[in-house]
Amino acid sequence: MRREKTVENYLTAQVEKLGGACEKHTNPGHRGDPDRLVSFPNKYRCMVETKWAEDATPEDHQLRRHEWWRKRGMDVFVLKSKPAVDVWIFSMIGRGAERV
């Protein structure tokens, strides 16, 4: 069984390969915020929620916070596996991030 931390660590490593930063996001008093704030050298920023299994879904309070961030212009992604991270990373290259 995959653990959420495994997906988070893999995400961080892949983002850093693109020269980006993948910081643990905490927001005291706001339960449900996405796990990571991701920034790329091209100034694109987004938030990522990681899950431990393909059938795992964000809880209602997390979905409300994801929507709160989206309404303020932040892209929020939910990634549930290493292959999902790989697909997402490929899409980030399409947005202008480059492998270093």
Image (cartoon, rainbow, N blue to C red):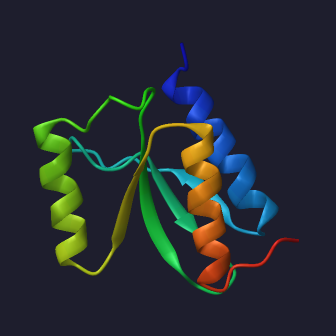
In the rendered image, which quarter is residue 32 located in?
top left
- Left/right placement of residue 59 relative to residue 79 reads left
For the N terminus, the quadrant is: top right
Residue 30 visible, this angle: no
Q: Position of residue 62 (x, y in %)?
A: 20, 44
Q: Residue at x 25, y 38 (%)?
A: 58
- Left/right placement of residue 90 relative to residue 53 reads right
Q: Is residue 92 above or below residue 4?
A: below
In the rendered image, which quarter is residue 7 located in?
top right
Q: Residue at x 54, y 47 (%)?
A: 84
Residue 41 visible, this angle: yes
- Left/right placement of residue 31 relative to residue 99 reads left
For the C terminus, the quadrant is: bottom right
Give the number of callouts. Answer: 0
Q: Position of residue 17 (x, y in %)?
A: 81, 60
Q: Which residue is the extreme one toward the top?
A: 1
In the rendered image, which quarter is residue 97 located in?
bottom right
- Left/right placement of residue 15 relative to residue 58 reads right
Q: Is residue 51 above or below residue 90?
A: above
Q: Residue at x 44, y 54 (%)?
A: 48
